[in-house]
Image (spheres, rainbow, N blue to C red):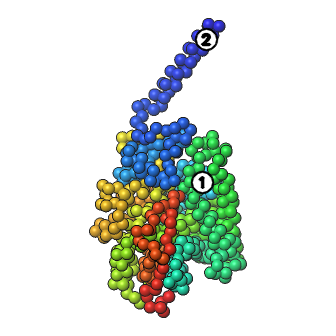
Amino acid sequence: MMEISWVFIALGAWLIALAFLSKKFNHPKRKLPPGPRPWPIIGNLNLLGSLPHESLHHLSQKYGDLMLLKFGSKPVLIASSPEMAKEILKTHDAIFASRPALAAGKYISYNYSDMTWAPYGAHWRQARKIYLTEIFNPRRLASLEYIRVEERRILISRLFPLSGKPIMLKDHLPLFALQTISRLVMSKKYFSDHYDQSNSDISIVSFETLQRMLDEWFFFGGAINLGDWVPWLSWFDFQGYVKKMKVLGKNLTEFHKYVLEDHKAKREAEKNYTPTDMVDVLLNLADDNLEIKLTTDSLMGLIQNLLVGATDTSALTIEWVFQELLRKPNIMEKAYQELDRAIGKERWVEEEDFSQIPYIDAIIKETFRLHPLCTLLPPHYSIDDCNVAGYDIPKGTTVYVNAWSLGRNPKYWDRSEEFMPERFIENDIDMKGQNFTLLPFGSGRRRCPGYSLGIKVVQTTLANLLHGFNWKLAGDMKPEDISMEETYGLTTHPNKPISMIMEPRLPLHLY
Ligand code: HEM
């Protein structure tokens, strides 16, 4: 009996020594970034709250601008300063250019075969090249300007009869944005809305249903799904997210398949068919001998990224602008004055006018500084071990860059909480990812490929809404009553959108 116990003790001691040695051997003197102590099972998930970017911002003031947390059992690095954002997105860009394999990528992005959730690799590289050279090349974008102009006119003519009545931008901008991108990507709308029944033969969903599907795509893309971080809990799907994502994935597939089939039929029906829209371009590429074959899943993923990328983003940016401007009537007045001076009262603002209206440009930048739509940039993921600012970051670490923190960093932004577009007149800071104090479109390899389209739509829509109408708060609401509270998601919305009254500013024959 005694002999057996000794054998067990010796075996136990040997195993402990082995575990210790293997830990030491695998991670010789690893220096990890500071961070709060994780709890068993949940790690630091309890610290996130309903506005994770704000919770992480506050934590970074205690632990520093490079913190290591645990979401469940997985390491998560948070970069909260321009210096650390630069380390991740520029110095070590190639290592952090992947995405974690979250359930959203699997269930609502065709098993990672879109661009947003694709891991860094050959498929993603090819998709990015297609976007930049075929879809968003300056020649193609310029040739489609007429669509953007027509859709903007439709928006203005729908708003005009509502002059003098309380309206909410959120009831108008999403439809305008979805309609514009649908025509750019697919030539026509495959959804019906209460203004226009002319496409009832090809529409397979209502605007409300399609919009809800896109909203849900953003919601699940930003949501903390427990099963992603505590894998053994994924089976239970306590939050019900995976179940809902599967339904959403099915509905999105149905929509995209219909669009693809309709385009294929059109190609087959016409001899010498020339591509007219972005779906046609993608279908042509699918016939080519590409390095990675474009499958139906990747075609659907790439079309979906165009729809979601362009809809929520431009509409929300403009909502945030108005949320700020109605709090500061003197800034709104300066914008009107600039438009009257540069454009005059006899015409609308065109894309080519933008160099003449720097104050409107400054208003947009200031809005992005305080309200980057992706308050946390979509997660990046390290594909190798590396050293960031003296800390060892293991392969397989998820990284969030807190864009919300960057825009509030007092070292770079004077009176950082105040909305002051003038700061961009004095200092021409770019938003394309070269300046790490302002990253509304990200930076590096994963930087937003839709920048040029997104910024054009935001600039001209905003400029024309301001040029065409005088805006004021509805009812007896005062500027100081406007709430700047946010609702968090992959994109962050105003929690309490405001009701406004507009009156035409231009001669009536222009509406
Ligand atoms: C106001 C407009 C827009 C804003 C603020 C915006 C912002 C962003 C941000 C912050 C990212 C993530 C960058 C990163 O991971 O580091 C991103 C990625 C992306 N955006 Fe945009 N975006 C806008 C418009 C658009 C448009 C118009 C499209 C397409 C039609 C688009 C398509 C995409 C795609 C496909 C990605 C994923 C890139 C990748 O993972 O490699 N975006 N965008």
Left or right: 251 with respect to 223? right
The yes-or-no answer for disc 2 within 8 Å of ligand 1 is no
Instruction: Check disc 1 and report its element: helix, strand or loop.
Output: helix
- Give the image quarter of residue 182: bottom right
Q: CA distance from mark 2 to mark 1?
A: 51 Å
| Residue behind mark 1 | 104
Kindly tell me whether residue 132 is visible in this rendering: no
Q: Nearer the viewer, residue 426 or 300?
A: 426
- Residue at x 52%, y 45% (from the top left corner): 45
Q: In the image, what residue type sits under mark 2?
A: Ser
Question: Tag 1 or tag 2, which sits nearer the N-term?
Answer: 2
Disc on res. 5:
2
Q: Position of residue 354 (x, y in %)?
A: 39, 77
Kindly tell me whether residue 407 is visible in this rendering: yes
Instruction: Check disc 2 and report its element: helix, strand or loop.
Output: helix
- Give the image quarter of residue 245: bottom right
- Residue at x 67%, y 45% (from the top left corner): 236
